[in-house]
Image (cartoon, helix red, strand yellow):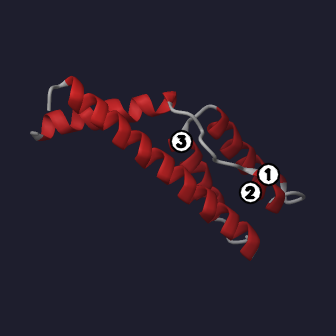
Amino acid sequence: MNTCKRTVVVGIAMLLIVGCGQKGISTTRLERSFKGTEAQMQANVRAVVKALEAKDYAGAAAALERLGAQAKLTEEQRAAVEDLLEQVRKQIAAAVEEKAEELQKMLGK
């Protein structure tokens, strides 16, 4: 597959991710570990939760990366961020793979 077609397939797959379900991603650990923290940290946690509720996995990953970059995190908070970020990345990868396979079938490949 040439570069142009591959770019189109990946781009379409990323757009179609929004239609995929949340499938087992739980924010409970993250929310619990940030309970009672400063307002900015809680705002970042809410951004993660809202992004996941909207099935915006790229937005959730970006918010998690911002949250994880904060210097004041406890070990529990850092672990919660890393765990959830890994789940989101797996969800993105699975959705892209699924949609890429569907697109290849549509293209007759």
Q: Report the residue at 22% width, 37% height from top.
A: 7
Give the class, few, some or many, for how many residues have Cα within 10 Å of label 1's Cα (few <14, many ≥20).
some
Q: Amino acid at mark 3?
A: Tyr
Q: Earlier in the sequence, mark 1 or mark 2?
A: 2
For label 2, the residue is: 30
Select label 1 or label 2 by which is in front.
Answer: 2
Do residues under tags 3 and 1 come within 8 Å of each other at their CB atoms? Answer: no
Q: Is residue 4 above or below residue 66?
A: above
Give residue 57's mark: 3
Give me the C-alpha separation between circle 3 and circle 2. Answer: 16 Å
Identified at 54% across, 59% down, the residue is 86
Mark identifier at residue 4: none
With respect to residue 65, does 72 lie above or below? below
Amino acid marked by disc 1: Gln
Quadrant of the image containing the C terminus: top left
Task: Examine the image and state in which quarter residue 67 appears.
Answer: bottom right
- Name the residue that disc number 1 marks: 42
Residue sitting at the far left: 2
Quadrant where the N terminus is found in the figure: top left
On the image, the x and y values in percent for residue 2 come to: 9, 39
In the rendered image, residue 105, in percent from the top left (x then y), is placed at 22, 28
